[in-house]
Amino acid sequence: MLDCAIIGGGPAGLAAGLYATRGGLKHVTLFEMGLPGGQITQSSEIENYPGFFDHSKTGMDFMDTWQEQCFHFGLKHEMKKIQHITKNDKYFTLTFENSETAQAKTVIVCTGSTPKKAGFKGEDDFFGKGVSTCATCDGFFYKNKPVAVLGGGDTALEEAFYLSNICSEVYVIHRRDTFRAAPSTIERVQRKENIHLLTDTTIEEVFGDAMGVGGIRIKNKEGNVSALDVPGIFVFVGHNVNNEVLKDENGHFICEVSEWGQVVVDLSMKTSLAGLFAAGDVRIEAPKQVVCAAGDGATAALQVISYIQEHA
Ligand code: FAD
Ligand code: NAP
């Protein structure tokens, strides 16, 4: 019987593992379907994690020491994908892909979320080299430069506004002539002089060379194709929250989730189900930053320790 099962080995899961093991829990296992590290390992650099300021290090390098530190304090890692979690009166059962199971007194879900792809030519090739899904992470690299934003929802327009305070011009490209975002957000964006709304427009292709993005080819509703010379393109066409593990065999969530599938937690990262915690990008209102995910993981682990003491 595990004291705590942690699902997902990104910043939230690893920080939870560190705090749980250093906090005295003996049987803590991190179930991560790949190598631990999470989304940030896809990034060529990270410069907004306090105390870490080394441009020669990639996201992968950055996360390497996190694992080492956790394993030093006794965290176990099993490379397994969790299919779903159930709870009886007292304990949780985790079911793996091969139908084997494990039992735990508490569970911290740290499975993150995945930004959706738009599907234009070159999107994958230039991902991390000019194509981004995170304005907070990468906006600063385009200080006083023009950028493009793709999407017409709340995220696209809010992030366009954020970028407009850093970049010289922001071109918002949206495939329809009306936006999905809240009316107040649309008005705020329309009032900003350096935001240009290109509606009924799609991205055909992102182009560039080994140095990165040179620009994008866009097509308007008349079918005219033109080039927009921007070194950065931010894609905000929605997120898939990785919440599948929280669905029971009938497809019902075992705890409360928002209308967008994000796990509802309180400030202690407690979900609506006793003993189940959620941390990082999978939770409601997640800022989707490494430092925040790590903070969530630490908070959740401290709560797990209290929960186990109370329920001993
Ligand atoms: P994740 O990092 O997404 O980790 C979730 C983990 O759960 C994954 O490893 C996944 O394999 C695992 N998992 C999912 N489902 C299962 C399952 N069923 N069973 C087992 N394992 C499972 N943030 C910053 O602060 N600064 C930056 O500069 C920055 N740059 C970024 C650049 C890129 C290219 C990307 C993609 C993101 C960037 N971010 C940045 C965002 C940051 O990476 C995320 O906010 C952070 O990683 C979220 O951490 P997490 O632990 O919640 O989830
Ligand atoms: P979203 O509302 O689903 O919007 C996605 C946008 O991307 C839509 O405008 C969509 O176009 C466009 N799109 C989708 N696929 C595309 C593709 N392949 N190519 C080009 N464009 C594509 O996603 P979101 O903005 O991330 O928001 C998700 C949810 O969170 C929403 O319900 C939103 O209201 C909420 N949210 C709220 C706030 C807030 O309240 N402050 C902030 C952020 C998010 P169409 O419009 O044509 O479908």
Image: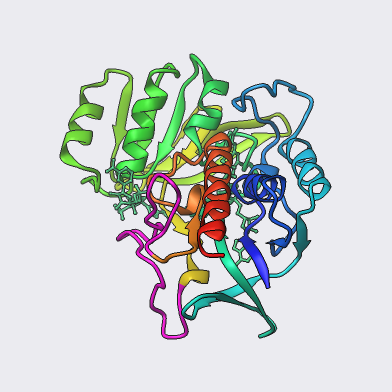
Tell me where residue 101 sits by quadrant: bottom right
Residue plotted at (41% across, 85% down): 250
Bounds of the magenta span? 247-272
Q: Is residue 268 magenta?
A: yes
> What is the chief secondary structure element of the magenta stretch?
loop
Residue plotted at (42% across, 36% down): 149
Between 59 and 64, the residue placed more toward the observer is 64
* Residue 195 in picture, x, y percent from top left: 32, 25
* Residue 75 in picture, x, y percent from top left: 76, 54
Q: Is residue 134 magenta?
A: no
The quadrant of the rendering that contains the C terminus is: bottom right
* Residue 235 in picture, x, y percent from top left: 47, 43
* Residue 99 in picture, x, y percent from top left: 66, 85
Between 268 and 186, the residue placed more toward the observer is 268
Number of callouts in the render?
Answer: 0
Residue 117 seen: no
Here the colouring is rainbow
Between 197 and 234, the residue placed more toward the observer is 234
Residue 294 seen: yes
**74 with respect to 228 (left or right):** right
Residue plotted at (51% across, 50% down): 303
